[in-house]
Image: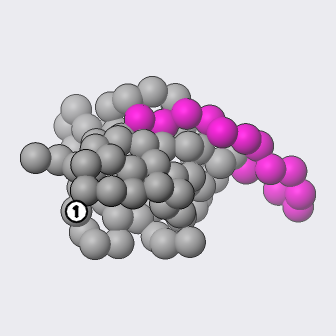
Amino acid sequence: MSIGKLYRSSDNQFLTHVKYKLLYSNPNSWAGELIPVNGSDITDGSGYMIEMADKMKRQCTLKTGRTVNGRSSYKIYRFGGSNLS
């Protein structure tokens, strides 16, 4: 998994570092899964930007994908969006 940063798009506020994996990508759209590094609980919806390893920020929408139980429980979020123009 790669490391990125999640921001609130309305005010460019940094929220958390994330581990992410792209599942699909082309020049105009992409989708993947992410896990907040600090275990933050993130509200589903639009209004986010993810800064990926290439340092580009992209608008994205988050949706809770699944909860993983083990030593500690954590949520895996699905995300998708398009490149900023």
Vertical side of 76 occupied by 53: above or below: below
Q: What stretch is highlighted in magenta?
A: 61-74
Residue 54 percent across, percent down from the top left? 28, 72
Which residue is farthest left? 85
Q: In this view, does 78 lie above or below 46?
A: below
Residue shown at 17%/47% (left/top)?
84
For the question of whether residue 18 can be seen, the reply is no
- Farthest residue, direction right: 70
Q: Is residue 29 above or below residue 22?
A: above
Question: Of residues 81 and 8, which is closer to you in this image?
Answer: 81
Question: Which residue is depicted at the point 86% across and 51% down?
Answer: 69
Identity, as a three-letter code, of the amino acid under mark 1? Met
Task: Please indicate, yes or no, whether residue 38 appears anywhere in the rendered image.
Answer: yes
Decide if residue 9 is on the left or right side of residue 24. Answer: left
Task: Please give left or right for residue 64 compared with residue 18 in the image.
Answer: right
Q: Does the magenta stretch include residue 38?
A: no
Residue 34 is situated, as x and y percent measured from the top left of the image, at 55, 54
Secondary structure found at label 1: loop
| Local crowd size for mark 1, using a 10 Å CA cut-off: few (<14), some (14–19), many (≥20) | few
Q: Is residue 61 left or right of residue 11?
A: right
**Magenta stretch: dominant secondary structure:** strand
Q: Which quarter of the rendered picture does the N terminus lie within?
A: bottom right
| Point 22% across, 32% down: residue | 10
User: Residue at left 22%, top 62%?
Assistant: 56
Q: Tell me residue 62's x, y (percent).
A: 48, 37
Q: In which image quadrant can residue 25 be found?
A: bottom left
Indicate yes or no whether the magenta region holds residue 72: yes
Outermost residue to the top: 45
Give the labeled residue for mark 1. Answer: 56
Colouring convention used in this rendered image of the protein? one colour
Residue 72 position, x and y percent, is 82, 56
